[in-house]
Image (tube, rainbow, N blue to C red):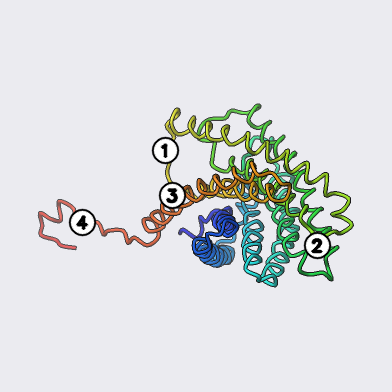
Amino acid sequence: MAVEGLTPGYFALVMATGILSVGTHLEGVDLLSEVLLGVCVASFVVLGALTVWRFLAYRSAVVDDFTDPRRAFGFFTFVAGTNVLGVRLGLEGWHAATAVLLAVAGLAWLALGYVVPWTAVLGRQERPVLATANGTWFIWVVASQSVAVAAATIEPVYESVRRELAVLAVVSWSVGVFLYAAAGVFVALRLMLYEFGPEDLTPPYWVSMGALAITVLAGARIVEMADAPMVRVTRDLIAGVAVLFWAFATWLIPVLVAAGWWRHISRRVPLRYEATLWSIVFPLGMYAVAGIYLGRADDLPVVAAIGRIELWVALAVWAIVFTAMARHVVNTVFRVPAEPGPTRAESDLGVSG
């Protein structure tokens, strides 16, 4: 059944749609932003219901995902998707919804941050686990930075807990930076030490760039935060590091495009719809929004202009992937398979269906 095989990383759909809604809102394309927000909310509700259904009806499949290093880190897309939706609702002035979603995502981030590495990596008897490292490991970074972005979003609103939110934002941002370094080392070693073919170069490798981009966005939001002790002592450092991360994310884009060309054109791996394609859309959208925010926060108009151009590229890719997803859902879920016709022997005997 489709629910049993639901990938834990499907909340990347929510992440991608939500961040593009944020970007179009920043650019004043309000109608498109509201449409994307509606799709984001609907996707969040549907995927949440399907996830609960899967946990109740197919618990063994969920356990299998938690113990598989190739898939387990996909659960962090729930954290990131929840926070991206919360940030977008915050732009509408629904700060209470942002706070509630941050609380849910924050608890999930803490729980998954200890459970997933143990069940999928440290607790496995098979060795070497390093051979299973892939692009999904960067989603842990994205989840951490999404907590920072959401906390920075509501920090100016809730003055009574401003210091606590500032601490949460800076701590989760810092954790995300160190996690990126660790994930980068693990994935790089996997590429250099083990056999790696075009079939292994899956879409989640784009998250290596998306994790950098959300680190930039989180840094820019922290720089814009009201003056709190934790922010005061780290503002200049975070602003500088954000620029460096943006530069590296920019450098990675041609590398990832070339890798896709090698996979699908040179090595002829068929390009068909799979849920992990949303792991390409989200990094593109996040890079755009991060550039827009960084350009405003650090007065870098060139960076902001690049972000605006990238936003429309990301929207085009979103439309393509969403159309492919809709066709896939129709073909695999809603289309009733045709009943088999009578065999030749049955036809000869005059037997009908």
Three-letter amino acid code at the position of disc 3: Ile
Give the spatial CA distance, label 1 vs label 2. Answer: 46 Å
Q: Quadrant of the rendered structure where residue 255 is?
A: top right
Give the spatial CA distance, label 3 vs label 4. Answer: 36 Å
Q: Position of residue 6 (x, y in %)?
A: 52, 56
Pointer 3 and pointer 2: residues touching (CB < 8 Å)? Answer: no
Three-letter amino acid code at the position of disc 4: Gly
Answer with mark 1 or mark 2, whichever residue precedes in sequence.
Answer: 2
Three-letter amino acid code at the position of disc 1: Pro
Q: Position of residue 16 (x, y in %)?
A: 56, 54
Which residue in the protein does label 3 denote? 320
In which quadrant will I find the N terminus? bottom left
Q: Position of residue 48 (x, y in %)?
A: 57, 65
Question: How busy is the neighbourhood of tag 4: few (under 14 within 10 Å), some, or many (20 plus)?
Answer: few
Question: How busy is the neighbourhood of tag 3: few (under 14 within 10 Å), some, or many (20 plus)?
Answer: few
Answer with mark 3 or mark 4, whichever residue precedes in sequence.
Answer: 3
Which residue in the protein does label 4 denote? 341
Which residue in the protein does label 1 denote? 270
Answer with mark 1 or mark 3, whichever residue precedes in sequence.
Answer: 1
Give the spatial CA distance, label 3 vs label 2. Answer: 38 Å
Give the spatial CA distance, label 4 vs label 2. Answer: 65 Å
Pointer 1 and pointer 3: residues touching (CB < 8 Å)? Answer: no
Question: How busy is the neighbourhood of tag 1: few (under 14 within 10 Å), some, or many (20 plus)?
Answer: few
Marking on residue 165: 2
In this rendering, the count of numbered labels is 4
Pointer 3 and pointer 4: residues touching (CB < 8 Å)? Answer: no
Between 164 and 288, which is closer to the camera in this rendering?
288
Q: Nearer the viewer, mark 3 or mark 4?
A: 3
Three-letter amino acid code at the position of disc 2: Leu
